[in-house]
Image: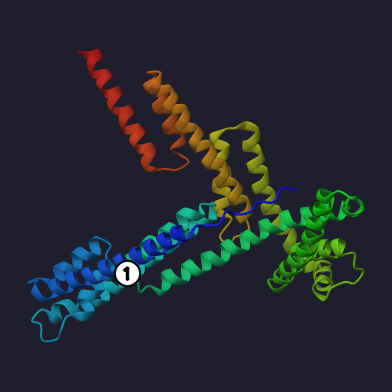
């Protein structure tokens, strides 16, 4: 077994990184103070603060819009006109918050986690005081953590079963005089205990969430690996819950939806048809509001990224060969996967111009 040890950083490298972080933080603070100073100056000198609020709102800068509205003094002759905008600004802000939260939720449901969090990060820069966006971010991170633990479960249970079946081999290695044999045996013995602890902790966590299938799988694997004959309370509860008819019916419904998603993904894998891929995506996104298909959404996103990148590469190759129409058609097809992708839009615009010029030349 190969053990990887991360290289130690030199003192100078650590110091440089810390300095860079502090500089970035200091720069952010300076920028924030500068922006607030500009907003304060505008508030003091502007002859039409209401127009400034409208412009800030149009630019999506809710921080600035609310700064103007909350900090204008009653002695300012524009106060009543500005204060009358409070209700509309509140409504616009609420709409903005809901749209960004829903967009992030939709992206997460299709497995596009990085984009989902970027949407919320960007939105929170536009409106730092948003409780709605903060809650949306927290909820999404909890959902991502749940998916992470579900994916971990599959890996850990398989590893536990494998290691349990190899205990005799591990014990045989320990009897040899060779140092490397003893090292492998000790490493796997330590890993065995680590696995037992992790499986137990994760199993109890899923029990708190009443995910009885994963509770059963994790704690059964932990018991198998430990060799214990005792049944932990959470495992006994999981077995009892799984035997109940109500749970079986609910689980059957969930499995039906999951089975459909799996079938659609497998259909695409066999056909490689873009229409089948989009059909699978539509089904998963529309049935994944609660996160029950997050695992399939993650698989879907990996497939989409691979197909999209392949489309970009194929189009590049065709374009390099002078087959501009074929390149454009290839890019146009994969644009259905990620509509509005900036890189793809640039490629398609370039191809359009070439095709337009060729058409003009042929007609002259």
172 to 87, vertically: above or below: above
- Residue 196 position within the rendered picture, expressed as x and y whole percent measured from the top left: 79, 65
Residue at 46% from the left image edge and 30% from the top image edge: 313
Q: Is residue 360 left or right of residue 42?
A: right
Quarter of the image where the C terminus is located: top left
Q: Write down the quadrant of residue 212 in the picture.
A: bottom right
Residue 252 in view here: yes
- Residue 230 position within the rendered picture, expressed as x and y whole percent measured from the top left: 90, 72
352 to 221, vertically: above or below: above
Front residue of 361 and 87: 361
45 to 336, vertically: above or below: below
- Residue 271 position within the rendered picture, expressed as x and y whole percent measured from the top left: 62, 32
Front residue of 227 and 175: 175
Task: Assign a secondary structure to mark 1.
Answer: helix
Spot the residue most to the bottom: 75
Residue at 68% from the left image edge and 43% from the top image edge: 263
Disc 1 marks which residue?
93
Count of marks overlaid on the render: 1
Q: Write down the quadrant of residue 146 in the picture.
A: bottom right
- Residue 121 position within the rendered picture, expressed as x and y whole percent measured from the top left: 40, 62
Q: Is residue 8 left or right of residue 341?
A: right
Residue 96 in view here: no
Q: Is residue 141 left or right of residue 146?
A: left
Pointer 1 local density, CA inside 10 Å: few below 14, some 14–19, many at least 20? some
């Amino acid at each position: 077994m190969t053990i990887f040890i991360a290289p130690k950083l030199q003192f100078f490298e650590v110091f440089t990184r810390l300095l860079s972080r502090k500089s970035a933080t200091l720069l952010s603070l300076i920028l924030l103070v500068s922006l607030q100073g500009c907003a304060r100056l505008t508030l003091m000198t502007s002859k039409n603060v209401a127009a400034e609020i409208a412009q800030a709102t149009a630019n999506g800068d809710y921080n600035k819009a609310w700064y103007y509205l909350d900090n204008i003094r009653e002695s300012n002759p524009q106060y009543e006109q500005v204060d009358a905008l409070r209700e509309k600004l509140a409504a616009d802000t609420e709409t903005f918050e809901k749209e960004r939260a829903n967009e992030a939720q939709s992206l997460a449901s299709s497995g596009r986690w990085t984009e989902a969090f970027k949407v919320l990060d960007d939105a929170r820069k536009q409106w730092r005081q948003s409780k709605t966006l903060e809650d949306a971010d927290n909820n999404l991170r909890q959902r991502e953590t749940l998916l992470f633990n579900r994916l971990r479960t599959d890996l850990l249970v398989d590893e536990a079963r494998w290691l349990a079946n190899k205990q005799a081999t591990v014990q045989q290695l320990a009897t040899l005089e060779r140092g490397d044999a003893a090292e492998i045996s000790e490493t796997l013995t330590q890993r065995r205990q680590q696995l037992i602890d992790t499986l137990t902790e994760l199993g109890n966590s899923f029990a708190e969430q009443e995910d009885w299938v994963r509770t059963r799988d994790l704690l059964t694997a932990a018991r198998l690996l430990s060799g214990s004959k005792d049944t932990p309370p959470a495992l006994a509860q999981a077995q009892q819950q799984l035997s109940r008819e109500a749970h079986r019916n609910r689980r059957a419904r969930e499995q039906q939806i999951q089975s459909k998603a799996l079938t659609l993904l497998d259909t695409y894998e066999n056909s490689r048809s873009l229409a089948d891929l989009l059909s699978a995506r539509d089904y998963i996104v529309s049935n994944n509001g609660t996160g029950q298909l997050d695992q399939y959404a993650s698989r879907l996103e990996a497939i989409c990224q691979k197909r999209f990148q392949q489309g970009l590469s194929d189009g590049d190759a065709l374009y390099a060969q002078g087959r501009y129409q074929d390149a454009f058609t290839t890019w146009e097809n994969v644009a259905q996967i990620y509509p509005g992708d900036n890189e793809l839009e640039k490629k398609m615009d370039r191809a359009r111009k070439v095709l337009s010029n060729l058409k003009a030349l042929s007609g002259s």
